[in-house]
Image (cartoon, grey):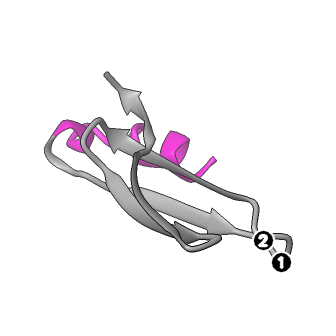
Amino acid sequence: EGIARIVKNQNYKEMQIGYLAINKNGDYGAYAVHNGFDYALHQNGINKMINAQAFAK
């Protein structure tokens, strides 16, 4: 919903905004306006970089 409101703005192509979410169970997710928003995750002793899904591809 947050990204949907942002892309209603005419200048969204000039912005990069990403959201990260995590719950108490350790479930996580991310979403961004454009591709290229990535984040680091450390879970169960393993580090990895994850590319968030994006609205504009």
| Outermost residue toward the right in this view | 25
Task: Name the residue nearer the viewer: 54 or 28.
Answer: 28
Picture coordinates of residue 16 (x, y %)? 25, 52
> Answer yes or no: do the residues labelled 2 and 1 have beta carbons within 8 Å?
yes
Magenta-highlighted residues:
1-13
Picture coordinates of residue 5 (x, y %)? 51, 46
Q: Give, as a three-letter code, the residue at label 1.
A: Lys
Task: Name the residue nearer the viewer: 55 or 39.
Answer: 39
Looking at the rendering, which quadrant does residue 18 occupy?
A: bottom left
Element type at mark 2: loop
| Residue 40 lies in the magenta-colored region | no
Looking at the rendering, which quadrant does residue 51 occupy?
A: top left
Residue drawn at point x = 76 percent, y = 69 percent: 26
Q: Quadrant of the C terminus?
A: top left
Residue drawn at point x = 75 percent, y = 60 percent: 27
- Label 1, residues with CA under 10 Å away: few <14, some 14-19, many ≥20: few
Residue drawn at point x = 33 percent, y = 53 percent: 38
Determine whether 5 is above or below 45 in the image: above
The residue where tag 2 is placed is: 23
| Residue 9 lies in the magenta-colored region | yes
Picture coordinates of residue 25 (x, y %)? 85, 71
Indicate which disc residue 24 carries: 1
